[in-house]
Amino acid sequence: MKVSLRWLKEYVDIPWSVAEFAERLTLAGLEVTGVRPVGVPIPPGLRLKSEHPSPVWDEDKVVIAEVLEVRKHPDADRLHLVDLNYGSGTITVVTGATNLKPGDRGQKVVLARVGAVLIDGYSAERVLRPLKPARIRGVLSEGMVCSALELGIAEEHEGILLLDPDAPTGLPLAEYLGDIVLELDVLPSMARCLSMLGVAREVAALSGQQVRYPPTQVLFGPQDAAAQVQVTIADVSLCSRYAALILDSVQVAPSPAWLQLRLLLAGMRPINNLVDITNYVLLEWGQPLHAFDYDKLRDRAHGQTPHLFVRRARLGETLTTLDGQVRTLHPDHLVIADTAGPIALAGVMGGRETEVGPLTQKVLLESANFDAVSIRRTARHFDLPSEASLRFSRGVHPDLVEPAACRAAEWMRQLAQGTVARGLVDVYAARPADQQVSLSLAYIHRTIGYPIPREDILRILRSLEFTVTPSDQDTWLVTVPRHRLDVQHGPADLVEEIVRIYGYHRIPPTLPRDPLPDYQTPRDGHVEDRIRDILVTLGCQEVITYALTRAERERPLVGDGADYVRLLNPIHPDRSVLRRSVLCSVLEIAAQHLRETNRLRLFELGYVYLPRPGEKFPDERRHLALVLTGPRLPEFWDSAAQPPAQDFFDLKGVLEGLLEALHLGEAARGTAWTEWQPTSVSWLHPRRAAALVLRPSTSHGASKTLPPTNSPSAPIVFGYAGQLHPHLNDTYQLGRREVYVAELDLELLLPYLPERFACRAVSPFPPVRQDLAVLVDESTLAEHVRQEIVTAGQPLLREVHLFDVYRGPNIPSGKKSLAWSLTFQADDRTLTDKEVAKLYQKIVGRLEKHLGAQVRAP
């Protein structure tokens, strides 16, 4: 919202400097995000952040002048000589303005004399340049008549700026039009301030001034409006009020300069007097209006009295809007229609067929109140943001319909010479009841924690136009003004208004009298932090993504038939469902980063949301996703050769390191341990995919709640890991590279994480290391061999490490050789050769018995 201080002062006095005013508005919740000086110096105490320079109109060089005569240039067909009176003398300047022609006299224009600093209207960039004398086609020009662009008022120019006839000749332009424009960030809760009067009410409450409301009386003509139009509201839930005024004999023309300038400073483009008046009243009152060409409506009704309907669009109906686009309508869209079909998208944009134009002579002026949600959805569906839809979607009270319509009608009578038909054709279908709130002094003090004086409380409420009626000692019945649609939560909203106007900065800081209780972080929260710390230690980087996504993005990972938790009113099609996979989100981040780097080790710990049939809320489960790709090591100065790429075993190493640190690895053997098993899932490479399996211990006791299982050792698949299937690289824009991924369901792991675990002291006795190579069937998993070695070697076997896999000469077909490094160690003695040999033979015997293995080397 752009607020001209010159305009705002017509409604309320401002007793502060610009800097103080901006600070007070910001502290009261109406943040001032920018200050734009128009023709005047930067106000003291302000630091401006502006992309575009703004000229300062020098008082003796930029003045108002009267056109004495416009003559043809003697040596140029498109140039004119303009004789001007600027109060203290006369001057002749050369201009090529299209809105001045030979023979013109009496217009008021802006004269800039030599030395004035203006914006260069012919430069591609907005730059300031001093005006210099120039000889143009043989005629010396020591000044120029200025356009709105050159003065810094507008972003484009269509001829020179013509001022109102009563502009005083010779007066410095800065004194006549100089202004300060505040840019306000109006939050949804402050939507009432999307108007000049809304801002004026805030200023009055902060300063103790009174608001000067503009007149809304209309001078009616002899005809009766009710005989010229009928209005029917077909859906009261979407339109609570619709009013129409009829104006005849209007003359469409450019708006006066003062009106055009106010619209320009508010960021709106002047069009003609009728449209500009509707926009002016919208900015003044916050009530959107629309003007229809009445004769076009009558033609559509075949010469009969037009009958307007506020209804839902019918399936298949179309409407060509003012921007020339043909819109296909749906029953969710609210339209204004006549007997021939839709003529406007209600509260969003009018239709081209009934728009006012240069030949319009009779106008139907619409002022209505529409449902906020309906307007917001329609504007978003058609991607048609507008000043009208912004205000309707934030909420406008239906009581604003009449004063705004009357204000606009009177302006059209004065500025377009129209005759206003008597009466307002007003259908007020759903009048909201006045809202009353009981408020006590004790509640205010208890909520704020500070005793604001009673007199200040009453003064603030009344200055905000609340009606306060005493109901008991220090208790009041407060009637909410009708423009305050944001007061929805009873006394809490009133307390917020009181402290907001009183000033948060005036509330002294205090400490609680009692000590704060110790906060105990839930166990699962500690575990999540521990997982993040472990993965960072393992060289991974955390990412955090949105839980909202689009179902099509996840389909390759979760399948075609997956059900989703869907949003009823998504802010964007890409944020329409709650995710079922965290991995999809991390892959999207990886694709973005791979444009800048070639090495990634990313993870995210976040929630997925799985619908539960017959349940109101979904199953929220914590998932962990990892993505690895690129070189195994980052580049460094001494790298002689290209480092090898990360592969399946890098991913396996990260996950094994995580599980070991969580005491769920093979070596832990506590509440549970984990295994890797080959698997096949659609989104992983068929030969580089593994399922992570959790095997609960038969004697767990560390966790308080464990999921039911069919047997003490029932395996639980809690995740998958492997190479992303190559055909999905293009789907997720990952290029021609191997990408290794994993996704784990942490909800299946958390119950088995030990809350306490034993630590083994470092043995002071030397370890004994031996190698063992065995021949096994090609189909035998190394993991199974490892498990058998560990089972047979306990309790003196401390480490088992696979260091070689061999296939080739001297190895029978269908066999493979697995070479293991075994480490034996005792805590209380040095192991003898005899003890180690006995353990070694025990391991060999178990491998031969259970796996059919053959020892290849001692």
Image (tube, grey):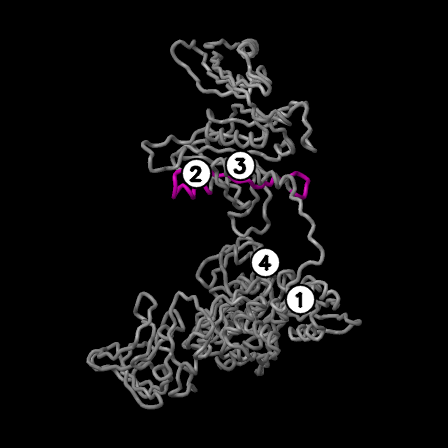
Disc nearer the start of the sequence (4/3) = 4
Tag 4–tag 1 contact (CB < 8 Å): no
The quarter of the picture where residue 338 lies is: bottom right
How far apart marks 4 and 1 lie (CA) works out to: 17 Å
Above or below — where is 168 with respect to 363? below
How far apart marks 1 and 2 lie (CA) works out to: 62 Å
Q: Nearer the viewer, residue 534 or 258?
A: 534
How far apart marks 1 and 3 lie (CA) works out to: 64 Å
Q: Which residue, as the protein is rendered here, is positioned at the far bottom?
A: 88
Q: Which residue is mark 4?
A: 374
Q: Which residue is mark 2?
A: 600
Which secondary structure lies at badge 1? loop
Disc nearer the start of the sequence (4/1) = 4
Q: Position of residue 711 (x, y in %)?
A: 68, 22
Q: Which residue is mark 1?
A: 429
- Amino acid type of the residue tagged 3 in the rendering: Ile
Q: Give yes or no for residue 604 being in the magenta stretch.
A: yes
Above or below — where is 447 with respect to 788? below
How far apart marks 4 and 2 lie (CA) works out to: 45 Å
How far apart marks 4 and 3 lie (CA) works out to: 49 Å
- Amino acid type of the residue tagged 1 in the rendering: Ala
Comparing labels 1 and 3, the label whose residue is closer to the camera: 3
Disc nearer the start of the sequence (1/3) = 1
Disc nearer the start of the sequence (1/2) = 1
Q: Position of residue 672 (x, y in %)?
A: 62, 26
Name the residue: 40% across, 41% down. Answer: 594
Q: Which residue is mark 3?
A: 534
Using residue 30 as the reference point, say whether residue 152 is left or right of it.
left
Extent of the magenta region: 589-617
Q: Is residue 775 visible?
A: yes
- Amino acid type of the residue tagged 2 in the rendering: Leu
